[in-house]
Every structure is written in C-alpha cells, then in structure tokens.
Image (spheres, rainbow, N blue to C red):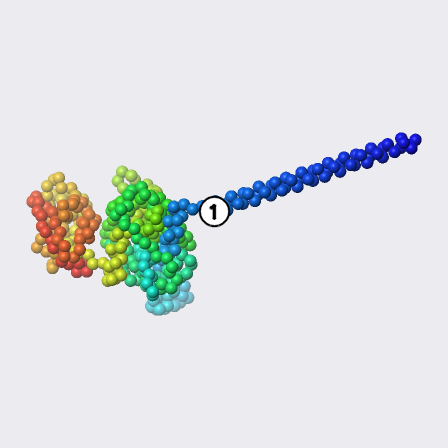
Amino acid sequence: MENKQSSPLKKLIKTCFIIGLGFLGGLLASLVVLQSNGNTTVTQVATTKVTSQNKTSTTEAVKVVQDAVVSVVNYQNASSTGNISSLFGQNPETNLNENAELQVAGEGSGVIYKKDKKYAYLVTNNHVIQGAEKIEILLADGTKAVGELIGSDTYSDLAVVRISAEKVKTVAQFADSSSLTVGETAIAIGSPLGSEYANSVTQGIVSSLSRTVTSTSDTGQTISTNAIQTDAAINPGNSGGALINIQGQVIGINSSKISATSKSGLGGVSVEGMGFAIPSNDVVEIIKQLEENGSVSRPALGISMVNLSQLSTSAISQLKIPADITSGIVVAAVQTGMPSEGKLEKYDVITEIDGQEVKDTSDLQSLLYKHSLGDKMTVTFYRGSEKRTETIKLTKSTQDLSN
C-alpha cells in the first residue's frame, strides 16, 4: 500500500521538474533573442552615422563658399496708411522719416568677396537694395550687421554694400566665367523667400551662356543683361546670391528667373528651371567701378528711339525704307551737344552697330555698353531708301543725358 501511494507523488515531482526545465529554457531563449536584437539595433545606428558623414564634390564645393553668402534685408519707411500711430490720430503731415518705424520692404541675398582690416564688401542685386532707408546684413552664423551702400547700377542690376569686417571669416572667390561650358555643374546658394531659409542650396547645370535677359526698371528704363542660364532652382530671395562651380568658386550672381511666359505661340504657360545669373567677369568689372566711383560711367549716343516693329504699317511707309527692312531702331530725336548730333537725324533707322545686327533697343543698348568713353562706334542706318554708315566718337556719358 505504501509503494502505491508514493507513485503519484513521484509523478507530480517529475512533472514539475519538466515544467521548470521548459520555463528555464524559454527564459534563456528570450535572453538570446533580446541580445541578438540589441546587436542588430547597434549595427543599424552605426550604419546611419556613417551615412550622415557622406561627402561629395557638391558638399565640398558648398563648404568652401557657404559662409560668404549672406541675407540682405531692405528696410523702408512705412506709408502713412500702414503706420499704426496714424490710426490713433497722429497728424498726417508729420514727417514719416522722423516718426515712422522702418519696416522690411524686401529681402535678398549677397556674396562677400573682399575684406580688409576694417570693412568687408559684398555684392548683391540693385533691385534688392533699391529705395532702402536701412540695409541689414544677416551673416551665415546668424550675426547681424548694418550695411552701408557704396554704389549701385540699374543697368547691370548690381550693388556693393560694406559692413564691419569684425565677424567676417570667409570671402568668396570669383571664377573666370569665360571658361564656362554648357552642361557643367551649377550650384545656387541664397535665401529663397527671405532670411528664414538662409543658405539654402540647390543644384543644376549651366543650361546656356550669353543669354540676353530684358527687363524694365522701376523708372521704366529698359535693361538688357548678359546672363548665364541655369536650371538650379532660383526663387525670390535668391537674388544677389551666389551661383558657384564644383570648385566652390563664384561663376555668377543670381538675378532673375522666368516663371511664366506669354510668348507668341506658347500662350500663358508656367515655366520651370529657367534661372539667370550675371557672369562673374561682368560682376568684377562693375563692382570695381562701384567701389571707386559709386556709379558706372557708360557712353551715350544722345538719341531717343523706338523699335521699328512697334510702328504701324502706315508709319513705316512714311519712313520710305526698303520693304525688306522689318526690324531695327527708329531715331525719334537727337539731343543737342551729344555724339549723335550731326551724324544721325530724326527718322533714321539703325540696323547695325559695328557690323552686328540691331533688331531692337535692347540690342543697341547691349552693343553700345560694350564700349568705353572715348571709343569709336560704327553705326549703319537707313535714311529713307539710302543705306549709310557713320563713325561716332563716344565722348559723352549717360550722366550727360538730359531728362
């Protein structure tokens, strides 16, 4: 009887032992899996760290110049309708310059290209600082400095501003833009949509060279600029920023883009990837004059003019020019005392400058401004049906033009 009673007890002990071994085995297996997962997690983190340190020719190029690219903030007086004090009954005749707070009128970018012991000099677009009562410069490290306008030029759309050199550590270098090739890498750096997005970087290629970009200034002056075309993204606020090559050298100053066109045959279509920059060689020539004189002296013919293509057929018939002449510049008036006096007459139709075809006023302006004061320029034109050529010495500048 005693042996029969002990048998169930032995079975219970045996069962508990087996369960215990199973639990212990499961625990050990769980620890192994957790340890294995821990090792995997560590491996993934290590891989991520390696990826974040990836370097390319683009990142190296940006590193060279990025700290020399700044944000430019244009402050102007608020209008009386927008001044909060006027809402509370301030005399509207009060001088705004003394009482109105300056407000941000626009933002753009700039490139520091020169530094001495006292000052650092930066180039930006003229339209970025135009009308500014105060110019504020935001450096790449977040430091702010008050900018002093040294000179500006409407035609080239360039301006030079200087700031204290105290916080400036990096200066950009200009490349030779005459050696650029279509298809090479182009990297844009600037502040699209303002300083909130300062030092944004976009990449593309040089799409074309020697494009003529025509625009109109705030004063109504036609501006024809020689430009580099690029598909690197350029947006409002990028104006005045750097377009660089893969070596980190500045090949151009970003100035404009085409976002839509109504060109004949295309309709009103939106456009992507058509940005423009002023070539570095042109920039260097202009900023040198702006530093020295505060302005750029250009030769002037002393004529007012209109595009032949803008005239009606009846007006063109009165000019009595050959029927195959469909483009050119019609002289509307000649200013007394200017180089064109005695050489050109009202209703002459200019078709060539120095042997190069002139289709419109932007062509003439572009060819004229390639000359310096004292140069001689050959002008081919029609006076009625007669084709003539005159050599004109450019003895007067744009400063000599009467309003």
Residue occupying the point 30% across, 45% down: 229
Q: Which residue is most to the left?
A: 386
Residue indicated by mark 1: 52
User: Residue 114 vs residue 316: left or right?
Assistant: right
Circle 1 — which element? helix
Q: Position of residue 18 (x, y in %)?
A: 76, 35
Q: Quadrant of the C terminus?
A: bottom left
Is 299 located above or below residue 9 in the figure?
Answer: below
Q: Position of residue 161 (x, y in %)?
A: 31, 60
Between residue 130 and residue 169, name the one nearer to us: 169
Q: Which residue is most to the right?
A: 1
User: Residue 282 vs residue 386: left or right?
Assistant: right
Q: Position of residue 23 (x, y in %)?
A: 73, 38
Q: Position of residue 9 (x, y in %)?
A: 85, 35
User: Residue 75 vs residue 329: left or right?
Assistant: right
Examine the rendering and report whether any part of residue 108 can be seen: no
Residue occupying the point 12% across, 40% down: 323
Q: Quadrant of the N terminus?
A: top right
Between residue 34 and residue 164, name the one nearer to us: 34
Task: Categorize mark 1 by other alpha carbons within 10 Å: few (<14), some (14-19), many (20+).
Answer: few
User: Residue 345 vs residue 169: left or right?
Assistant: left
Within the image, what quadrant is residue 300 found in? Answer: bottom left
Between residue 282 and residue 5, name the one nearer to us: 5
Is 231 located above or below residue 300 in the figure?
Answer: above
Examine the rendering and report whether any part of residue 2 can be seen: yes
Q: Amino acid at mark 1?
A: Ser
